[in-house]
C-alpha cells in the first residue's frame, strides 16, 4: 500500500511539473477584471489577512520562508515590510523561472500592479505600488527548491531555523491524503524556530482546480482537519479567519478558505 501511495504521489508531482502552466495560472486567478469576481474576492481576502498578520499584527523578524510559492509574489506585499529576507520555495522549475522573470523585471513578466495597488491601499497609499514592487524584489535574494513530503523540505540545502513560515495554497495541492498532509506540516515546522510563526492559507473542501484544459487534484480538507494538523505539528493557533464561497465555480470546487496564524511551541 505504501509503495502504491508513493508512486501515486510521484506521478502527481510529474503531472504537475509537466502540465502546470504558471502564466496561465496567474492569468486565470490573479488578473483583476470585472468578470473574475470570485477570484478577486479570494485574493482580496488573502491580502487583507496578510496585512492583518504582518502589518497590524506585527509579525516580524529576520527571515521568512515561503513554502510552495508557485509563480506568484502577491503574498509578499505585506511581509516585505517586516522581514529582512524572504525566501520563496517551490517544487517545479517552471514556477522558479516565472518568478525570476518578474524579479529581473523582464519583458513579458506577469503584471502584478493591480494587486500591488490594492495592497498599498490597505497600508494607506495606493500610489506607492511601484516602490512596493521594488521592495519585494530587493527582499528576495534566493529562490529554492522545495518538497514538503521530505523530512527536510529544502534538501539538499540546510538552513538555520527562521522566524516565520508562510504557505499559501500549497499543501492541499502537494498532499494526496490526510496523513501525508499532517506529515508535511511536521516537515515544514522543522524550518521555523521555537517561538516563530506559521502563516497558513488553505482552500477548504476542494477536490480540483483548473489551469487551462488541465485539471489538478486537491486534498479535501475541512477546517477541523486543518486546525488539528497545525496543532499536531507543534503550533498554537493565535487567530483564524474563514470565508465561504457563494456558489460552485467551473475553475475549482472549493467551498471556502481559511487563513491562520500560529506560533511554534
Image (cartoon, rainbow, N blue to C red):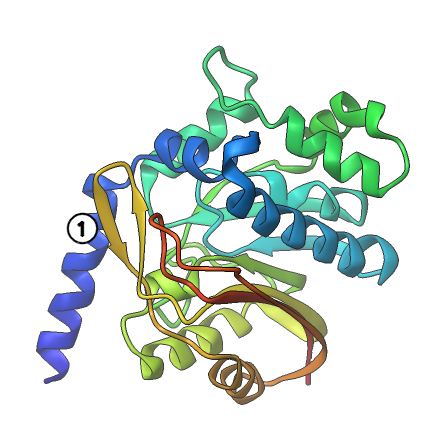
Which residue is outermost to the front?
247
On screen, residue 243 above or below 224: above
Across and down, in percent, residue 201 comes to 57, 62
Q: Quadrant of residue 156?
A: bottom left
Tag 1 residue: 14
Query: Which quarter of the figure is the N terminus placed in?
Result: bottom left
Task: Identify the residue at horizontal 87%, vertical 57% (top origin).
Answer: 56
Instruction: Determine whether, in the image, residue 166 is placed left or right of residue 6.
Output: right
User: Is the C terminus in the top left, top right, bottom left or bottom right quadrant?
Assistant: bottom right
Q: Position of residue 101 (x, y in %)?
A: 47, 23
Image coords of residue 124 (percent x, y): 90, 37
Residue 102 visible in the displayed image: yes
Along the line of sight, the residue nearer the viewer: 223 or 233:
223
Picture quarter containing residue 242?
bottom right
Callout 1 crowding tier (Cα within 10 Å): few <14, some 14–19, many ≥20: few
Disc 1 is placed on an element classified as helix
Amino acid at each position: 500500500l505504501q509503495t502504491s501511495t508513493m508512486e501515486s504521489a510521484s506521478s502527481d508531482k510529474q503531472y504537475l511539473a509537466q502540465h502546470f502552466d504558471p502564466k496561465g495560472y496567474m492569468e486565470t486567478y490573479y488578473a483583476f477584471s470585472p468578470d473574475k469576481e470570485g477570484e478577486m474576492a479570494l485574493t482580496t481576502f488573502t491580502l487583507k489577512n496578510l496585512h492583518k498578520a504582518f502589518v497590524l499584527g506585527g509579525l516580524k523578524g529576520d527571515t521568512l520562508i515561503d513554502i510552495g510559492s508557485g509563480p506568484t509574489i502577491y503574498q509578499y506585499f505585506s511581509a516585505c515590510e517586516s522581514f529582512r529576507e524572504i525566501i520563496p520555495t517551490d517544487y517545479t522549475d517552471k514556477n522558479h523561472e516565472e518568478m525570476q522573470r518578474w524579479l529581473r523585471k523582464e519583458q513579458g513578466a506577469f503584471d502584478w500592479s493591480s494587486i500591488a495597488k490594492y495592497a498599498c491601499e490597505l497600508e494607506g497609499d495606493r500610489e506607492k505600488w511601484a516602490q512596493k514592487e521594488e521592495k519585494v524584489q530587493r527582499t528576495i535574494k534566493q529562490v529554492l527548491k522545495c518538497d514538503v513530503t521530505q523530512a527536510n523540505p529544502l534538501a539538499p540545502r540546510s538552513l538555520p531555523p527562521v522566524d516565520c513560515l508562510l504557505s499559501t495554497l500549497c499543501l492541499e495541492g502537494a498532499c494526496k491524503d490526510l496523513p501525508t498532509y499532517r506529515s508535511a506540516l511536521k516537515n515544514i515546522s522543522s524550518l521555523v524556530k521555537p517561538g516563530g510563526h506559521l502563516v497558513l492559507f488553505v482552500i477548504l473542501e476542494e477536490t480540483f482546480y483548473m489551469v487551462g484544459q488541465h485539471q489538478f487534484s486537491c486534498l479535501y480538507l475541512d477546517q477541523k482537519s486543518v486546525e488539528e494538523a497545525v496543532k499536531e505539528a507543534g503550533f498554537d493557533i493565535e487567530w483564524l479567519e474563514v470565508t465561504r464561497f457563494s456558489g460552485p465555480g467551473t475553475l475549482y470546487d472549493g467551498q471556502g478558505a481559511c487563513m491562520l496564524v500560529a506560533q511554534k511551541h
